[in-house]
Image: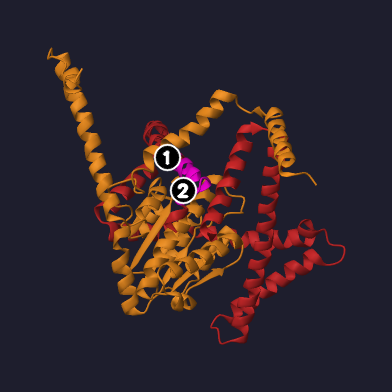
């Protein structure tokens, strides 16, 4: 059996060998650029707070009131995580929407848990079913309402996109709040019509460009296109982060206006104030 | 601790897949391949688990006082027929002629019939849009009506003019809007994918 020194030496030799036998697929510079772009975008977008925009996305701020009304009238929350799923032969962009829909489900589930409203999730993908169940359990844990977790459930309705639409059309209705979030295809309009039709408040969220008309026409809150990804920041409700982003946006606008005015003034023959202002 | 471990696993798996996409390395490739095989296994076991829960739920419906007992019977019978056709001795599995016939003669017509109703749902959605969204709904449907009029199959000079206008609408304003949407979605999808792979978003849930 090798001692620790020999083990470290073998590991280093293995790592050096692995590096030595590798080669870049697209060259070193494009690889570095590919790795740097997400980091730069992350540093620009993800800081200083989680929120990306100062404006409200998809009327999600109305959710608390809708949840209270559902609690008063004894109705439930119904959630569909789209029809793209995670392991189906849908495009990667559509499957990513399913992943993005899970935090939205968590946001609704936490509000429902606090209000004592049961949540029913329907999924046509078995893996999504397990993830949704985990999200519901986590929501009850975060809100310290585990005693209410028995009333919420996730149902696997079977495989296939037409099935999601058929199940929605066969739904009895009478829900308090409806959320349809994730990748949608041709069946999207039927899915939304079946679930959102009778609910007092509904939100449709999809980034599929060809299916944007459904949420815009049928739902009270529409989170469409890139907004689906922005909504991730929206569901982290921190008032100070919203204030920070609004302030940062105003600061950026102010700086751009100052730069434009300064440039125009210099073009008009005014002296350059920049060296004086920065002390040079 | 549990969250740290799951976040670390997410980051390691994500970086491994990302590096395999960028770097040609046999060791890295086999590690990434093993991860993908694990995913396939996970999906397969989830499918079996999902089917079992589906059967259990509908058996419970039949045993209880569910109002939709006929639906449960049809679903269980359908599952049984497809399973029997695919698993009987001498069957070719999913490509067995009986399974293919069941799909072509039952499932495809059912799905086609469902999608044939899309036009009526579109009309209902348009009515709902005008009632609920007011001015915004009217503007949206007016734009849709203009597109429909431009695509009318009319002959002669007016038809040529409409076809030219339709081409322009499709290739300039519509294509511009779609491109803008796709670019926005692609950028934010890349950012979101990176955040998920690097475990940045794990703290919110």
Foreground residue among B91 and B186: B186
Q: Are marks 1 and 2 in contact (CB under 8 Å)?
A: yes
- Location of residue A262 by image quarter: top left
Magenta stretch: dominant secondary structure? helix
The quadrant of the rendering that contains the C terminus of chain A is top left
- Residue designated by label 2: B200
Q: Is residue A184 visible?
A: no
Q: Looking at the picture, how far across and down is residue A150, in whole percent?
A: 49, 78
Q: Is B23 contained in the magenta span?
A: no
Give the colour in which the image draws chain A.
orange
Question: Residues in magenta?
Answer: B187-201
Vertical placement of residue B13 versus B157, above or below: below
Q: Is residue A219 visible?
A: yes
Give the colour in which the image draws chain B.
red
- Which residue is at a point 42% across and 74% down the rendered structure image? A145
Q: Residue furthest top?
A: A269
Q: Residues within 10 Å of mark 1 (few under 14, many from 20)?
A: some
- Which residue is at a point 30% across and 53% down the rendered structure image? B137
- Circle on res. B170: none
Q: Looking at the picture, how far across and down is residue A61, in whole percent?
A: 29, 59
Q: Is B199 contained in the magenta span?
A: yes
Chain of the residue that carries numbered disc 2 in the rendered image? B
- What secondary structure is found at the residue carrying circle 1? helix
Q: Residues within 10 Å of mark 2 (few under 14, many from 20)?
A: some
Foreground residue among A102 and A157: A102
Q: Confirm whether circles 1 and 2 share one chain.
A: no
Chain of the residue that carries numbered disc 1 in the rendered image? A
Vertical placement of residue A182 versus B57, above or below: above
- Residue designated by label 1: A42
Q: Looking at the picture, how far across and down is residue A244, in whole percent?
A: 26, 46
State the separation of the CA atoms marked 1 and 2.
10 Å
- Which residue is at a point 57% across and 68% down the rendered structure image? A157
């Amino acid at each position: 059996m090798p001692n620790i020194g020999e083990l470290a030496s073998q590991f280093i030799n293995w790592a050096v060998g692995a590096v030595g036998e590798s080669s870049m697929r697209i060259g070193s510079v494009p690889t570095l650029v590919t790795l740097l772009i997400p980091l730069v975008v992350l540093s620009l977008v993800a800081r200083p707070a989680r929120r990306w925009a100062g404006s409200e996305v998809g009327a999600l701020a109305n959710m608390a009131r809708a949840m209270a009304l559902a609690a008063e009238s004894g109705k439930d929350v119904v959630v569909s995580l789209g029809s793209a799923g995670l392991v189906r032969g849908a495009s990667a962009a559509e499957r990513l929407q399913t992943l993005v829909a899970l935090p939205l489900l968590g946001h609704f589930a936490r509000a429902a848990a606090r209000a004592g409203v049961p949540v029913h999730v329907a999924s046509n993908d078995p893996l999504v079913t397990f993830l949704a169940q985990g999200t519901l359990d986590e929501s009850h844990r975060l809100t310290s309402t585990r005693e209410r977790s028995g009333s919420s459930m996730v149902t696997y309705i079977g495989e296939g996109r037409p099935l999601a639409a058929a199940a929605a059309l066969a739904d009895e209705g009478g829900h308090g709040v409806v959320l349809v979030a994730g990748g949608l295809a041709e069946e999207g309009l039927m899915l939304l019509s079946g679930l959102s039709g009778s609910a007092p408040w509904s939100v449709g969220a999809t980034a599929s460009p060809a299916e944007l008309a459904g949420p815009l026409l049928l739902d009270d809150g529409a989170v469409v296109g890139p907004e689906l990804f922005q909504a991730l920041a929206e569901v982290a409700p921190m008032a100070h982060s919203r204030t920070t982003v609004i302030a940062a946006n105003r600061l950026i606008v102010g700086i751009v206006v100052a730069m434009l005015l300064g440039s125009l003034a210099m073009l008009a023959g005014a002296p350059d104030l920049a060296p004086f202002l920065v002390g040079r | 601790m549990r969250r740290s471990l799951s976040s670390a696993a997410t980051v390691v798996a994500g970086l491994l897949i990302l590096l395999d996409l960028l770097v040609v390395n046999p060791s890295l490739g086999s590690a990434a391949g093993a991860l993908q095989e694990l995913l396939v296994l996970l999906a397969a076991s989830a499918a079996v688990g999902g089917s079992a829960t589906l059967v259990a739920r509908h058996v419970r419906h039949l045993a209880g006082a569910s109002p939709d007992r006929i639906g449960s019977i049809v679903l269980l019978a359908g599952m049984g027929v497809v399973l029997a056709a695919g698993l009987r001795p001498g069957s070719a599995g999913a490509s067995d002629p009986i399974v293919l016939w069941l799909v072509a003669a039952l499932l495809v017509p059912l799905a086609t019939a469902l999608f044939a109703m899309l036009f009526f749902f579109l009309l209902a959605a348009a009515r709902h849009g005008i009632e609920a969204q007011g001015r915004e709904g009217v503007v949206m449907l007016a734009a849709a009506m203009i597109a429909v009029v431009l695509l009318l199959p009319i002959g002669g000079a007016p038809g040529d003019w409409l076809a030219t206008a339709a081409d322009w609408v499709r290739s300039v304003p519509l294509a511009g809007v779609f491109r803008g949407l796709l670019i926005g979605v692609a950028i934010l999808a890349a950012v979101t994918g990176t955040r998920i792979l690097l475990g940045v978003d794990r703290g919110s849930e």
